[in-house]
Structures are given as structure tokens and as C-alpha cells.
Amino acid sequence: MTYTLSQIAHAATGQMFGALTNMLKKAADHAAEKGVDESVYLNWRLVPDMLPMIRQPQIACDIAARGLSRLAGADIPSFTDDEKSFAELIERVGKAHAVIQGLDTDALDADPSADITFPVGKENMTLSRHAYVQNMILPNVYFHTTTAYGILRSCGVPLGKMDFLRGA
């Protein structure tokens, strides 16, 4: 059986966006239950030199929506990074997911072995379209979703492995 880039990308981002949404809802509930202002969790870091929790879903959304839009030859979406609550982060995850669901699957699936060049910091990098999905987009989505999970767990949010694996 052969899988297309769009099938792989939709399955993986759907699962991770479902997991993020679930984790963010549980975090909001936990903060309310404990009487903790959401900003405490949103600004939490595991170590001083890492990005705070709020940036983890933002980056996961950016990498997935922008990367897959680039792959499909569509306009690159822009998100403002102005979320200040779990509800706003959940809304952002929904917007990013909608962008991905709206992409042309034929364009996503076009010639997986063809090269694509994309920005990485101040540099450009070139990979095959398949490697771009497999080695750049999806690992970054997993990384930032997992990091959000770890930060929220360190805040005491009752999350378990199935919250990550089950997705929605």
C-alpha cells in the first residue's frame, strides 16, 4: 500500500492538533480548578533559556500550516502570535488545521521526489518534498506538541501518554 504526502500530513497534523486542543482544554480547566491565572501556565518554561509554553502550540501551528501551504504552492498563512489565553490558543490550532484541510491534495501530492527550497532562520534549505514533510515539518510539529505536553505536566496538569497519542 502506498501513502501520499497529503494522507501522511493530514493524519499526523490532525492527531497532533487534536492532542494540542485536548491538552490546552485540560490546562485551562486545571488552572481554573486550582485558582491559578492562565498566564502562569502560558509563560511557564522547563528551563530559563527555552521558549515558554504559549510559543509551543504557536510554532507547531506555524510550521504545519506554513510548511504544507508552501508544499502545495498556496499562499503562506500568517498568524499574529497575540494569543493570551488557552481559548485563544485553541482557536489558533483550529485555524491552522482549517488551513491544512483546505489545501489542494493534488498539489500536496505532486512529485514527492522533486526539490523544495524553504527558509530556515536566515538561510535557505533544499530537500525533496517527501523529506520536507518527513524530516522537517512533522518532527517539528511532534517536538513542539511534546514540549507543550511536558511543560503542562510540570505545571501539574493531569495529562497522560494517551492525551498525546489519542489526539482528539
Image (spheres, rainbow, N blue to C red):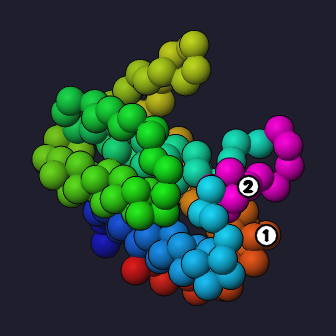
Query: Any magenta on residue 60?
Result: no
**Percent from the top left, x then y, of residue 88?**
40, 56
Instruction: Give residue 33's quadrant in the image.
Output: bottom right
Q: Are marks 1 and 2 in contact (CB under 8 Å)?
A: yes
Q: Which residue shows up at 68% across the image and 81% down it?
A: 34
- What amino acid is labelled 1 in the image? Ser
**Percent from the top left, x then y, of residue 36?**
67, 71
- Screen quadrant of the N terminus: bottom left
Mark 1 Cα shell of 10 Å, populated few (<14), some (14-19), many (≥20): some
Magenta residue span: 40-49
Looking at the image, the residue that sits furthest to the front is 35
Residue 144 in view here: yes
Instruction: State the mark number for residue 44.
Output: 2
**Percent from the top left, x then y, of residue 97?**
30, 57
Q: Which residue shows up at 34% across the image and 59% down it?
A: 91
- Label 1 residue SS: helix
**Relative horizontal placement of residue 12, taking residue 140 as reference (left or right):** left
User: Measured along the vertical axis of the image, is residue 159 above or below residue 49?
Assistant: below
Q: Which residue shows up at 36% across the image and 37% down it?
A: 79
Q: What is the spatial separation of the Cα atoms under label 1 and label 2, in whole angstroms?
A: 9 Å
- What amino acid is labelled 2 in the image? Trp
User: Measured along the vertical axis of the image, is residue 101 above or below residue 159?
Assistant: above
Q: In the rendered image, which residue does mark 1 sit on?
A: 154
